[in-house]
Amino acid sequence: MEKKDWFFIIAAVFLVWFLDQITKQWALQNIYSLKFYGPFGLVLIKNPGAILGAFSHLPPLLRVVSLSTGGAFLISIYASIQYLLPRRSFVLRSGMSILLGGILGNVTDRILDSAVVDFLVIRFFGHVSPAFNLADAFQWLGYGMVVITLLKEGDQLWPSENERKRTWVLPKFQRKFTLVSMAIGLAFVIISGVYSYTYLKVSIHALAASKAPGFEDQYLIPFLETFVVVVIGFLFLLLIIGRLISHRIAGPIYAFELFLEDVLQGKDRPLRLRAGDDFQHLEDLSERVRHHLKTNFQTLAKNDEKTLNKDEPVETGAEAS
């Protein structure tokens, strides 16, 4: 991935989000009733759920918090996959960006207004589709790009010859790296959790001091339940990411150690790292080591040959007779 590739891929997220927000603002200001233009119709609906009204049956507090937090959680998953993909695969990466941009467009609505603005419908064979918006359409486009790429290039994205037989190449280092990553993540989670819970509890108590004693629990218990689910998911994600990143670090180091051991034993072989490994410069370094050793060996061999020729006695005519 070059810098211009990253620019287009990241820009796609913001472009989709911007187009979605602009069209929703237009819909809020210009759509007043259902109107069809051929198979396409315009109607203004506030959807409290997810795509096509999913999860709209949940309690408002749990629904808004869960769906909004889920959107934020997807950002970390998106960034992790973009970083961990071993191939360029521009279509797959662009599809993920389009998908994320659409999700964030709806998440923005939930955060600001607790509901998503839907204004598009399609009429076909006498039936009318559920209302959706541009973000939903972009999400389906992103899903399609991801699925098609996985079906067409799945073997190239994760080729079997590019995988190591062992997941834990340097177990002690990798486990330590993963546990430290999870511990740091857990520390930030605890800090944000204590702050959020305390702020929410104090705010509810100050605004509803005259309410029944169980009033706080109606808000705090769903918050804690959702928070625990998010923490478990976040730690599980850190576990996977820590294992993968540590594998990319430990693998090249372990391979280079084996290369040096073979060289010391007189075995001449190149060092080949996997796609996505860190420390790719070790391949160039290994080639320099091989070239240096070959040159020195050839020089030593020539010097030895010259020394042997110089030390050989020269036969005179008398000795020959």
Image: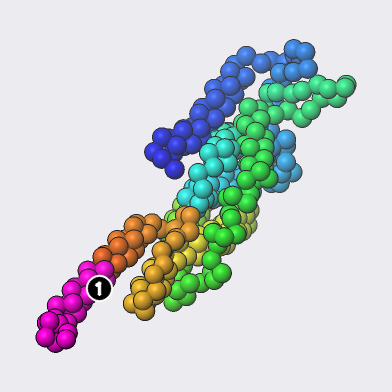
Q: Quadrant of the rendered structure where residue 125 is?
A: top right
Along the line of sight, which residue is nearer the eye, 227 or 177? 177
Q: Residue at x 59, y 55 (%)?
A: 159
Report the quarter where the N terminus lies: top left
Q: Tell me the kind of residue under disc 1.
A: Ala
Q: Is 271 included in the stretch rendered in magenta?
A: no
Q: Residue furthest right?
A: 126
Q: Residue at x 72, y 35 (%)?
A: 52
Q: Which residue is mark 1?
A: 301
Q: Position of residue 264 (x, y in %)?
A: 33, 77
Magenta-highlighted residues: 297-321
Residue 303 as seen in the image, left or right of residue 122: left
Q: Position of residue 292 (x, y in %)?
A: 26, 65
Q: Quadrant of the rendered structure where residue 112 is?
A: top right
Report the quarter where the C terminus lies: bottom left
Number of numbered discs on residues: 1
Residue 307 as seen in the image, left or right of residue 269: left
In the image, residue 222 sits, relative to residue 318, either above or below, namely above
